Image (cartoon, rainbow, N blue to C red):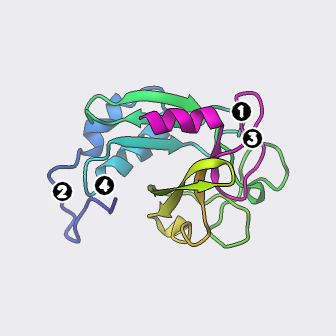
């Protein structure tokens, strides 16, 4: 997806406005809902789904939300689950990311808006490349940042990735069904 605003600032007619979507995003903290709604509003086409990760929360918290946006005015929460952050983002190994980077080899998570790009079969099976759409994650594709399942992510325990959005196998299976 590309940014949904033109150079003049007008929003594409077929794209929901942030104010249309935000009140309907259930179970999200208000600041996260605002960011999620802005992401939907800047999409060039109406997205079918939205994944939101609140990296300010500890990795053991269910800080990943997936929404079905088939009806953008009535998003449906598909799942809420854990997601790992990069080991470099948590130098104190407290479980909370405090540093973020888009530098190759940093082992850090990059914040920003992503597009889920092409699927591939990786080390742990079905996975997706992530294309960074923000200045803060513009090198994500070149860094091989992925959405992938991992044995080190479960409801009871989450370890660290090398910067990828690693989730439990069941989480990715549920996402694939939607």
Q: Is mark 2 on a helix, strand or loop?
A: loop
Cα distance in 3D space between marks 3 and 2: 41 Å
Cα distance in 3D space between marks 1 and 4: 31 Å
Mark 1 vs mark 2, foreground winner is 1
Cα distance in 3D space between marks 1 and 2: 39 Å
Name above or below for residue 60 compared with residue 131: above
Q: Residue at x 26, y 47 (%)?
A: 46
Q: Which residue is drawn at 25% across and 33% down?
A: 71
**The C terminus: image quadrant:** top left
Q: In which quarter of the image is residue 117?
A: bottom left
Crowding around mark 4 (Cα neighbors within 10 Å: few <14, some 14 to 19, many 20+) is many
Residue 59 locus on image (x, y percent): 71, 40
Q: Do the residues labelled 1 and 2 touch (CB within 8 Å)?
A: no
Name the residue that disc number 4 marks: 43
Asked whether 28 falls inside the magenta stretch, the response is no
Name the residue that disc number 3 marks: 151
Name the residue that disc number 2 marks: 12
Mark 3 vs mark 4, foreground winner is 3
Q: What element carries label 4?
A: loop
Name the residue that disc number 1 marks: 154
| Mark closer to the chain start, 3 or 2 | 2
Q: What stretch is highlighted in magenta?
A: 149-178
Q: Residue at x 48, y 39 (%)?
A: 176
């Amino acid at each position: 997806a590309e940014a949904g605003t033109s150079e003049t600032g007008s929003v594409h007619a077929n794209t929901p406005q942030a104010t249309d979507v935000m009140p309907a995003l259930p179970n999200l903290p208000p600041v996260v809902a605002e960011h999620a709604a802005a992401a939907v509003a800047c999409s060039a086409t109406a997205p079918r789904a939205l994944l939101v990760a609140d990296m300010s929360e500890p990795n053991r918290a269910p800080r990943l939300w997936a929404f079905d946006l088939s009806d953008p005015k009535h998003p449906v929460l598909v799942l809420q689950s854990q997601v790992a952050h990069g080991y470099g983002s948590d130098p104190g190994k407290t479980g909370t990311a405090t540093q973020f980077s888009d530098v190759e080899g940093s082992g850090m998570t990059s914040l920003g808006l992503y597009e889920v790009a092409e699927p591939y079969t990786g080390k742990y099976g079905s996975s997706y490349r992530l294309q960074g759409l923000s200045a803060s994650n513009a090198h994500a594709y070149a860094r091989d940042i992925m959405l992938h399942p991992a044995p080190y992510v479960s409801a009871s325990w989450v370890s660290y990735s090398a910067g990828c959005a690693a989730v439990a196998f069941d989480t990715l299976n549920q996402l694939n069904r939607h």
